[in-house]
Amino acid sequence: MSERSSKIRKPKSPNRNAIAQFSMARKSSLLKQTIVLSAFSILAIYALLNTFFNPTIFPSSLFAEHHSRDNFGFPGEVAKSDVNKVKIFMYDLPKKFTTGIIEQHALARGSKDASQAKYPGHQHMGEWHLFSDLNRPERDRIGSPLIKVDDPDEADLFYVPVFSSLSLIVNPIRPAGAEPVSVPQYSDEDMQEQLVKWLEKQVYWRRNRGRDHVIIAGDPNALYRVLDKVKSAILLLSDFGRVRPDQGSLVKDVIIPYAHRINTYNGDIGVKDRKTLLFFMGNRYRKDGGKIRDLLFQMLENEEDVIIKHGTQSRESRRAASRGMHTSKFCLNPAGDTPSACRLFDAIVSLCVPVIVSDGIELPFEYNIDYTKIAIFVGTTASLKPGYLVKMLRKITTKRILEYQKELKEVRRCFDYGNSNVTVNEIWREVAHKLPLVKLMINRDKRLVKRESSEPECSCLCTNQSGIITSV
């Protein structure tokens, strides 16, 4: 038994090296898992803290590479949730305020079948594009900050789609001594008065005195006769040249771009094919602040590499202006009858660096566009110093011009109404920004004592001119 027992092998003790290797591998695996788990935990905590304590701040540049893609609604991008959108209701105005004006325009020009007439092209046709946008199916309004509603009780804002700018130019100007036309003359003044009467019958207009309504008056003379009666609304204007301080301001209103009237430049940035230093083509003789044009003509028309000439809004003039802007480094933009003019937007789409001589100009989308990156601003007084303007422009280096052109190429889509879901969306975005002020003023109006006052009501600054309720 003892011999047999002695032949039975005892189990071998585990190899110490194998144990050590296994232990090290296990520790290494646990360490890796711990590191990975810790990393995920840190990232999760960071994301949580960042969400609550660092809300998203959009960049100051409209086209910064890292901007939120749903902030500006370019084609093909996913729209924001409808919950976050401002709700807008568009009035179904009587035909005489919308398509009826198009027909009147066609009839005044000899059309035999005005019912087939299309909205004519002109510099204030933004009113047509806004109207068309709200008539499109919601699925096509990609990236819009507004959602159209069919029930006015659901609306935050109300759009009044009157073609106020087209109404001004329905009747063509007849030369002195010309025979009267057979078609009865259309009256823009009557249209304005009838519009106000129609609005004043609407319960939603009366409810808040029109504060939550949006009305477009792109032409500086649009709605001039009734502006005092609609000034509580958010006005869409090209500038404030013909608007009194008690009628409008940047506080409550929105500056919209003119529609450019010349062809977009499709080439790349560069100065090789831009031989002209400075170009301007437009009406030499203007009223009010536009008188500076004639003075600039006198100073610049004999400069060697400057083209400055008189032109009108004709088809041939637009072709000549396109050629001039597409072959010039800088485009002069003096004030017209009012501080702004459509040639600024012609210059932008031409990649011709605008030289703006207009001390009182207001510009569209300035809440997010730095115009000093795309244009040169010259004070009126300085521009009239002999030799000042051309000397300054000749000192600007090719590198700097290319920088201007690069920025122009980035932002020009914002000024092209034909580019669906961009320009219109930017206008609606500024309108949406006014909603908090609208709500504030509506609630404020409810607590004020109304009294007669000989002083004009300041709709823009919304000062308390009627007193505070001290007793009930």
Image (cartoon, rainbow, N blue to C red):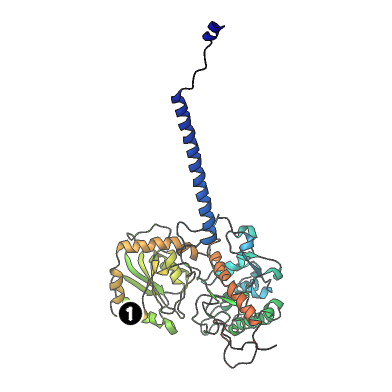
Residue 416 appears at what percent x and percent y? 50, 64
Q: Which one is in front, 198 or 4?
A: 4
Q: Which one is in front, 355 or 466?
A: 466
Tell me which residue sits at (51%, 77%) in the image: 250
Q: Would residue 189 appear left or right of 45 to someone viewing this image? A: right
Picture quarter with the N terminus: top right
Count neighbours of disc 1 (C-alpha within 10 A) and say few if under 14, some if 14 to 19, many if 20 or more.
few
Which residue was labeled with disc 1?
A: 382
Q: In the rendered structure, which amino acid carries the disc numbered 1?
A: Ala
Tell me which residue sits at (69%, 76%) in the image: 204
Q: Quadrant of residue 439?
A: bottom right
Residue lying furthest front: 2
Residue 139 appears at what percent x and percent y? 63, 57
Q: Which one is in front, 459 or 339?
A: 459
The answer, for residue 171, to whether it is visible in the render is no
Q: Quadrant of residue 320?
A: bottom left
Picture quarter with the C terminus: bottom right
Q: Would residue 346 appear left or right of 70 to someone viewing this image? A: left
Q: SS of the residue at dot 1? A: helix
The answer, for residue 441, to whether it is visible in the render is yes
Q: Which one is in front, 37 or 186?
A: 37
Tell me which residue sits at (36%, 76%) in the image: 378
- Say above or below: 455 vs 459: below
- Say above or below: 158 vs 53: below
Q: Quadrant of residue 152?
A: bottom right
Residue 273 appears at what percent x and percent y? 34, 60
Residue 8 appears at what percent x and percent y? 54, 10
